[in-house]
Amino acid sequence: MRRLLLIPCLLAAFLWSAPCSAQARAQLGPLCTTDTTPADQMIDACTKIIALKVFSGEKLATIYFWRAVGWNKKGNYAQVIADATEALRLKPSTAVYNLRGSAYYDKGEYDIAIADFNDALRMGPPSGIIYHNRGNAYRGKGEYAKTIADYDAAIRTGPKSAFSYQNRGSSKQALGDLDGALADINEAVRIDPSLPQPLISRAVIWRAKGEIARAIADTTEAIRLAKAKAPANIMTPPGSVLISAYTQRGLAYEAKGDAAHAKEDYASVLEGVASDAGSKANQATAKVRLALLKEADAAPRKTAAAPAAESSPAPAPPAPTAPTARVQAAAIARRVALVIGNGAYAHVKALPNPPNDAHAIARSLRDIGFTVSEGLDLDRDAMQTTIHDFLREAARSQIAVVYYAGHGVQVDGRNYLVPVDIEFKAGGRMTDAMVDMDTIMAGLDDQIRTNILILDACRNNPMAPQVASAGPSRGIEAGSGLAAPASLGSGSTLGAGTLIAFATAPGQVALDGEGANSPFSAALSRHVGTPGLEVQQMLTRVRAEVVAATKGKQVPWSNSSLLGEVYLAER
């Protein structure tokens, strides 16, 4: 995502009029304060000037600013922040606030970035560049009304800003206004046809519309442009444009069914050096998608040792009366679900109800038109196979639901689902025996997909020695609970968003229930198929039922980056 740079008001000629060594005047000064200087030379020159100790106050602040620019070129945002903070201590300026805010943005720390952009705007005068960059940060948070308002302000200030049009278009796309998004991004392409970034954003819209050939064409041209000429703006994270272009083309090839070209593009994504949050998210997605495609190539496929997952057949496609693009769009609009219930644990406390819960939820989802992959009492191999098959299937979907019932734990801030053959051994890596939720989320990460993840699992940490000493709860050992996601919608997922629902509040135990189903899953199965019930309203009803049924002992909890209303059952 393009960020823009403000140059400080102090000019190099003014700086180098001060007494200092001849070398600094003739060589170090221009190397330090010229934005086309290679990063390492810029940093070295600025460092040597600082070491001369001939500047102070505003002039020294400018040197720290330019060294921060050099660090920014290298994607070293911690050093950018350190130097920008020193510059602000010496002499606050809009340019330095803008630079530091942009570094916080690239680290994914959006609230701090917004605070810096606010300070820059307060110093004035109003700047389209800062409005644009603050809009980027609001977009990272999923606050799209504020996002679009800032891009509007940037465009009023600078109507020829291709990147403000591009990012406003991407924001409209996230809100479901594909035609408005396309108009904005087409304007960005018209303003500057040499830029690869608007073409990447337009490719996302083509894929959302089901026009896969156009998506591939735009990303191919974006890759050509990015290779022919590196992005001129020093605020563009190193390598981010190519990483984004290859990711989007890989997803388009995969949607087309062209696994060979998709694998090549995902491999290219992983060859890049990711410094910013978006590039890192793209690489996480590419890593999972590449592994899935390579696994699909392996022959013969490994047979799962545990009970096989079953899938309901997809509805028969309509007669081919529409153009190919519309048929593709229909394929992308499919709704898929993964449902797993693990209860027959061999080495930790068994849970009687998860298979019943999973079967009830799977049936409810099938009844409202989802294609469901269902797995019961899966060991690790079977669990991996079922999940990977689902993630491959989800590549062409617009809505993906993941439901899991059974043991679930947090280790070092990451959430894991527990297969039925889990066995904790001294000296062993416990996480190797479980399934990482981050892998599932990375495999689903896509700007055109809505993801709903529902976990009816314990929220406890199994690291203590009393592993299975508790009663019949969905917990292995009382502890800190599952980790709430720190950010939903950050990185590459800037589309329809993600919702994660937990059966209980942080640090609490999700009860298995005294009947055939857990309190949470019993309530969920009653409401998930209600026609015209928006998903967050549905979860509110589920929460109320669970609280009543458990007399307040269990309170379901959720975290959402959804940008609009989502209906699992059509109105």
Image (cartoon, grey):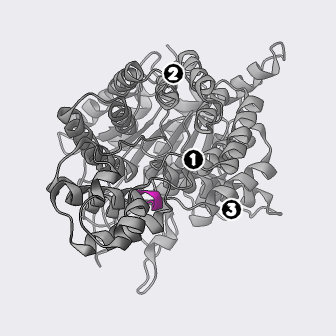
Do the residues bearing badges 3 and 1 touch, measured as CB atoms within 8 Å?
no
- Name the residue at 42% across, 40% down: 4
Q: Which mark is residue 304?
A: 3
Q: Where does residue 111 sit, x and y in percent of width and height?
A: 26, 43
* Viewer-nearest residue: 213 or 534: 213
Horizontal placement of 456 versus 441: left or right? left
* Viewer-nearest residue: 339 or 492: 492
Figure check: 336 above or below 420: above
Q: Residues within 10 Å of mark 3 (few under 14, many from 20)?
A: some
Q: Earlier in the sequence, mark 3 or mark 1?
A: 1
Q: Hey, what amino acid is under mark 2?
A: Gly
Q: Earlier in the sequence, mark 1 or mark 2?
A: 2
The residue singled out by tag 2 in the image is: 176
Q: Is residue 75 magenta?
A: yes
Which secondary structure, mark 1? loop
Q: Is residue 511 magenta?
A: no
The residue singled out by tag 1 in the image is: 231
> Which residues are drawn in magenta?
72-76
Q: Hey, what amino acid is under mark 1?
A: Pro
Which secondary structure, mark 2? loop
**Going by the picture, which residue comes out furthest to the bottom?**
427
Residue 469 visible in image:
yes
Q: Where does residue 5 sit, x and y in percent of width and height?
A: 39, 43
Separation of disc 3 and disc 2 at Cα? Answer: 40 Å
Q: Hey, what amino acid is under mark 3?
A: Ala
